[in-house]
Image: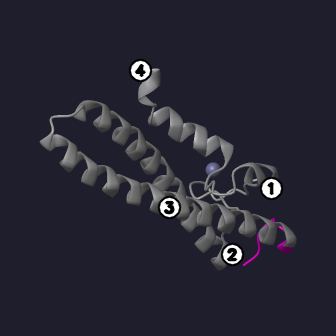
């Protein structure tokens, strides 16, 4: 299988992806360890009737961050597997080449700019409602 990317470009993007994958995995692990510690601390504090609501808010922020990072990690894994199978750099929706410049900015991207913007239009972020 051939792509429009040179082997140097694929290697470069693969390295960025693997580095990012490791960073995310380490961070998510720390986050989940932190969450279980918070749970444990909360159990103790609840017995004293302490400020549980504030702790819930902190926890929600952690969970929101971890959701985002889990999504990114999934996309990175998909990108790495596509890199392995030679289909990396092709838009998963229309099959067009995704330019190297775009991949360099966002190596885990799976779509060309056009398809990505279409998706975003059909799935508006709640903030823009
Ligand atoms: Zn496309």
Q: Residues within 10 Å of mark 3 (few under 14, many from 20)?
A: some
Marks 1,3: beta carbons within 8 A: no
Q: Say which residue appears at 31% left-offset and 57% top-offset.
A: 36
Instruction: Locate residue 11, reporting x and y percent.
Output: 79, 72
Secondary structure type for disc 1: helix
Lower position in the chain sequence, tag 2 or tag 4: 2
Q: Give the labeled residue for mark 1.
A: 100
Marks 4,3: beta carbons within 8 A: no
Lower position in the chain sequence, tag 1 or tag 4: 1
Q: Residues within 10 Å of mark 1 (few under 14, many from 20)?
A: some
Secondary structure type for disc 3: helix
- Indicate left or right for 66 with 81 as reference: left
Lower position in the chain sequence, tag 2 or tag 1: 2
Marks 2,3: beta carbons within 8 A: no
For the residues labelled 2 and 4, the Cα–Cα distance comes to: 39 Å
Instruction: Locate residue 79, reporting x and y percent.
Output: 61, 65
Callout in the foreground (1, 3)? 3
Secondary structure type for disc 4: loop
Callout in the foreground (2, 4)? 4
Please check the rendered image and state whether residue 30 is part of the magenta-colored stretch, yes or no.
Answer: no
Lower position in the chain sequence, tag 4 or tag 3: 3
- Residue 129 is marked as 4
Q: Say which residue appears at 62% left-offset and 52% top-offset.
A: 111
Front-most of 95 and 127? 127
Residue at mark 1: C-beta within 8 A of ligand 1: no
For the residues labelled 1 and 3, the Cα–Cα distance comes to: 21 Å
Q: Residues within 10 Å of mark 2 (few under 14, many from 20)?
A: some
- Residue 74 is marked as 3
- Give the residues in magenta: 1-7
- Residue 86 is marked as 2
Q: Height in image: 104 above or below 1?
A: above
């Amino acid at each position: 299988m051939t792509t429009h990317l040179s082997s140097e470009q694929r290697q470069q993007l693969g390295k960025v992806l693997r580095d990012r994958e490791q960073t995310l995995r380490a961070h998510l692990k720390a986050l989940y360890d932190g969450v279980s510690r918070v749970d444990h601390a909360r159990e103790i504090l609840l017995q004293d009737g302490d400020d549980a609501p504030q702790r819930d808010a902190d926890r929600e922020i952690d969970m929101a961050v971890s959701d985002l990072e889990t999504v990114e990690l999934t996309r990175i894994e998909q990108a790495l597997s596509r890199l392995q199978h030679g289909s990396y750099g092709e838009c998963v929706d229309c099959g067009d080449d995704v330019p190297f410049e775009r991949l360099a900015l966002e190596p885990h991207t799976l779509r060309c700019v056009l398809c990505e913007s279409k998706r975003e239009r059909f799935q508006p972020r709640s903030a823009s409602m």
